[in-house]
Image (tube, grey):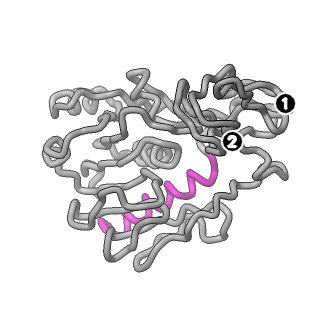
């Protein structure tokens, strides 16, 4: 299979980053990512979206660098062995990229503007797309069903229930939910150890407290405007902070399916 194909990955959150990491690891070197100006990724230890703020982000040995809005900048980053991240690119620049493959990893649970005509192969992660109509393949991303990673050639992915994956017997109780509406300021960061009841941040004068002991696994970048009840992140009930900087088995399974879908089309 020709691994010089240009792959455009929309989104740079946890799942999209895992896909980019996996494709790069498999020898695909013309990968370009996009994201919005202020992404609200939670598992920031494994999200290339952090490059939007820090100019660069490395995950398990693979680096993404924020690119200027020009093909010269994109090609310079690619030639240096990194993946360029375009922040809120304009339509004309995306046209200039001329991707062979598009992977929509935005995970918005709705189609924000990806169509089957945009590339010879278009793949979408999760609900909001219909394979055979909107895109060529949809990858199942619901972590709570046996079909995680299924390549759907006709039809749609399962709607997400909002129930997180169980970790060490903990599911909903792991979530960090906003205690109010306002601006969130964090006092903890990804990987920090916490006890039950520890203050992770504030929304106004209301404390965001850890619901269980463990380590901060997910937490949106702050300051950020939030609404009461909004999911802001989660706690891993273990004590090993390194888990916060490792791609999960679930994300790797989704990545393997993306690679399989590409292989189906081009082998």
- At mark 2, the secondary structure is strand
Pointer 2: what residue? 177
State which tag comes first along the sequence, 1 or 2.
2
Q: Position of residue 238 (x, y in %)?
A: 81, 37
Q: Position of residue 267 (x, y in %)?
A: 32, 67
- At mark 1, the secondary structure is loop
Quick check: is 95 in the magenta stretch?
no
Residue 197's tag is: 1
Query: Which range of residues does the magenta coloring cover?
Result: 248-267
248, above or below 60, in the image: below
135, above or below 53, in the image: below
Label 1, residues with CA under 10 Å away: few <14, some 14-19, many ≥20: few
Q: Position of residue 174 (x, y in %)?
A: 76, 44
Q: Looking at the image, which is closer to me, 265 or 105?
A: 105
Q: Looking at the image, which is closer to me, 25 or 32?
A: 32
Which residue is at 22% across, 27% downward?
Answer: 76
Quick check: is 262 in the magenta stretch?
yes
């Amino acid at each position: 299979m020709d691994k010089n194909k240009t792959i455009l990955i929309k989104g740079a959150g946890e799942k999209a980053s895992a896909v980019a990491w996996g494709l790069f690891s498999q020898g695909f070197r013309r990968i370009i990512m996009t994201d919005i100006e202020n992404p609200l990724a939670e598992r920031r230890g494994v999200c290339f979206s952090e490059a939007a703020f820090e100019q660069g982000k490395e995950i398990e040995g693979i680096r993404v660098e924020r690119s200027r809005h020009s093909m010269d900048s994109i090609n310079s980053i690619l030639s240096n062995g990194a993946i360029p991240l375009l922040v809120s690119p304009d339509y004309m620049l995306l046209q200039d990229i001329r991707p062979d493959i598009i992977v929509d990893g935005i995970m918005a649970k709705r189609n924000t503007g990806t169509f089957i005509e945009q590339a010879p192969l278009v793949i979408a992660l999760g609900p909001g797309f219909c394979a055979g109509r909107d895109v060529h393949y949809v990858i199942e991303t619901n972590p709570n069903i046996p079909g995680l990673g299924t390549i759907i050639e006709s039809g749609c992915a399962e709607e997400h229930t909002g129930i997180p994956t169980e970790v060490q017997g903990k599911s909903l109780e792991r979530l960090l939910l906003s205690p109010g509406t306002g601006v969130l300021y964090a006092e903890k960061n990804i990987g920090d150890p916490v006890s039950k009841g520890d203050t992770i941040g504030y929304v106004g004068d209301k404390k965001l407290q850890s619901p269980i002991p463990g380590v901060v696994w997910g937490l949106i970048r702050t300051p950020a405007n939030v609404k009461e009840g909004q999911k802001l992140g989660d706690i891993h009930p273990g004590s090993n902070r390194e888990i916060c900087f490792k791609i999960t088995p679930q994300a790797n399974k989704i990545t393997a399916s993306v690679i399989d879908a590409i292989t189906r089309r081009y082998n």
